[in-house]
């Protein structure tokens, strides 16, 4: 199994969409890329932690490749809007791919460059090393209770 961490704005819709794909074993919502290892939604919303809302995916690379996951990334949100998705605004809603290895970084860069041609160079997605990931415990628990 492998892990992918992706920021596509608000994490709920991407988590649901990725969760329907064959080869995605587990999804989790959280925050990544910020200054501290632990944070909360309230802290993230201040804009001071530098965290992005993300979906963390555990996937089987024999069924779905990391490249395919990144292609869905660009289909599942608008990668041309800076720090916003729909009615959500703030740095936590940025478009960002968090890589865990050099291999993931190279694949993400390749797919971004290919996709950016279709978007006439307007993609604002960042590609960054995954640091300070933490699950959105308060929201993940509420979601699980609704099931």
Image: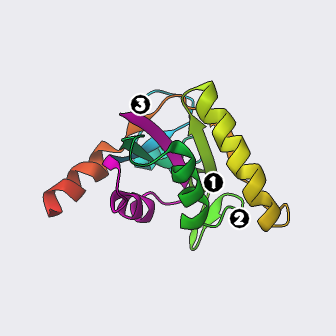
Q: Residue 81, labelled with which disc?
A: 2
C-alpha gap between disc 3 and disc 1: 21 Å
Q: In the rendered image, which residue does mark 1 sit on? A: 95
Using the image, determine if residue 94 lies above or below residue 105: below
Residue drawn at (37%, 43%) of the image: 59
Disc 2 element: loop
Disc 1 element: strand
In this orientation, which residue lies closer to the viewer: 41 or 80?
80
Q: Is residue 121 left or right of residue 62?
A: right
Q: Which residues are magenta?
A: 1-25
Q: Quadrant of the N terminus?
A: top left
Total numbered labels: 3
Using the image, determine if residue 34 lies above or below residue 9: above
Is residue 22 found inside the magenta-colored segment of the image?
yes
Q: Nearer the viewer, mark 3 or mark 1?
A: 1
Residue 50 appears in view: no
**Which of disc 3 and disc 2 is earlier in sequence?**
3
Residue 118 on image: x %, y %: 78, 67
């Amino acid at each position: 199994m492998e892990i992918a961490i992706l920021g596509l704005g608000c994490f709920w819709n991407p988590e649901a969409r990725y969760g329907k794909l064959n080869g995605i074993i587990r999804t989790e919502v959280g925050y990544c890329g910020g200054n501290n290892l632990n944070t909360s939604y309230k802290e993230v919303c201040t804009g001071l932690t530098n965290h992005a809302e993300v979906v963390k995916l555990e996937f089987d690379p024999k069924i779905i490749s990391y490249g395919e996951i990144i292609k869905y990334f660009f289909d599942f949100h608008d990668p041309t809007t800076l720090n916003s998705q729909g009615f959500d605004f703030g740095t936590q809603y940025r478009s960002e791919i968090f890589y865990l290895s050099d291999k993931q970084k190279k694949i993400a860069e390749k797919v971004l460059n290919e996709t950016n041609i279709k978007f006439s160079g307007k993609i604002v997605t960042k590609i960054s090393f995954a640091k300070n990931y933490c699950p959105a415990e308060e929201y993940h628990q509420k979601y699980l209770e609704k099931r």
